[in-house]
Amino acid sequence: MITRGYFIGEIVDGLSDIAHQVDTRTKLGLTDLNLFVENFFKTALNLLLDINLENMNQERSNFPGLDLADVVKGWAFQITSQKTSAKVNETLTKITDDQLRDYTSIRVLVVGKKQSTYSLDDDQKLRTGFTEGNVLDVDDLCKLAMDLPIDRLQSLYDHVRKETASVKIDLEVPDEEGKYPTTIYDYIEKIPQPKLSDFARYAASEQVVQTGLTREAVEKDFRALAAELAKLPRITREFFAVLIERRDDDEQRHFGDDRFRVNTDRLKRILRYPDLDGELRILQAHRFVDYREPDQHGDSGHWRLFFPGTSEYFHFMVDEFLKKRGLSWRRPIVDLDFSEF
């Protein structure tokens, strides 16, 4: 069971990582924070303080003095990477009299670590009622998390866990060539390169010779299949290999149906993969499976398996070839390794 301590620890780590990233940028003279970062802290503050802040810069860039505000409860925040007294005084100067009437609880959130003391402008302190205690930093947010009810604590944990990586990427600093440490290509699965043979061994097998297929025709089948398999994500190829391995017994096929098939209800019980439907949709879109409704009331539907681009009975011949050599479907289907053929 996940404990309060675990939630708090993860929240502290996530917020601290963001603060460190902002501190690195600030040391390089990069003090701007964009809407993405502001919105991250908007949600965090809403959960921490049970308020409903909106981003004032969403529709109007650089809303005077304030970034986030809840007009109903009277809360407002300036979100900044700059911790200095000068920055806080500048913020107070920009706050209008209308805003002071609308927002009775104004805070400055330093994304990082605030100063130990502040020299605030006396006139602005008098006008706004702002004090040093109204300057918050990430450490203050972590302290607020300690006392949250468990439901809001878990919501904050979910938010921080989900968004921290994106915020940190958004705050990355480019190198001298303008390249960023993290790009979307770091998260894209590489297109696999099939490992093909000359298919002479397979073409010479008894079951293939009996069909009269030439080695060239055999190679054409395998190249076509490999090209289609390479379009699938690796996890989807694994899913397809499981379908082949755990298919219904051959005698369960209907008369005239020469396809491997998998009982839908049985599949749901033997495979507890969380996105089973998603994998089936991908395979269906790439013509590897289709669904057949049950023939009679009370029967199960089933998925038929296909091998795009191949000749008739290809799957039966390959299955027999693999069985005779004690090989698995996983190597050609998942690894795209056809070297044994």
Image (cartoon, rainbow, N blue to C red):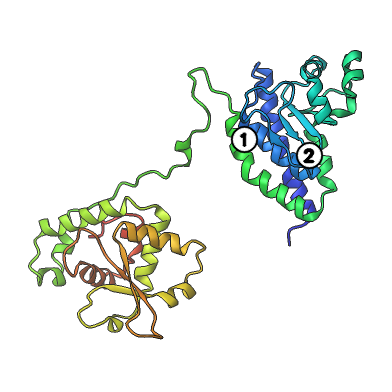
Q: Quadrant of residue 27?
A: top right
Who is closer to the viewer here, 227 or 122? 122
Quarter of the image with the C terminus in it: bottom left
Whether residue 17 is visible: no
Residue at coordinates 60% horizontally, 39% vertically from top-left? 165
- Point out which mark residue 167 bears: 1
Q: What kind of element bears circle 2?
A: loop
Look at the picture and state if 337 lies above or below 290: above
Q: Amino acid at mark 1?
A: Val
Badge 1, how many Cα within 10 Å: few under 14, some, many 20+? some
Left or right side of 213 for 271: right
Quarter of the image with the N terminus in it: bottom right
Q: What kind of element bears circle 1?
A: helix
Label 2 vs label 1: CA separation? 28 Å
Q: Closer to the camera: disc 2 or disc 1?
A: 2
Q: Which residue is mark 2?
A: 72
Residue 189 at x, y percent in the picture:
42, 45
Q: Quadrant of residue 326?
A: bottom left
Who is closer to the viewer here, 229 or 96? 96
Q: Amino acid at mark 2?
A: Val
Residue 308 at x, y percent in the picture:
24, 59
Residue at coordinates 29% horizontally, 60% vertically from top-left? 287
Look at the picture and state if 57 lies above or below 30: below
Residue 107 at x, y percent in the picture:
81, 29
Whether residue 148 is visible: yes
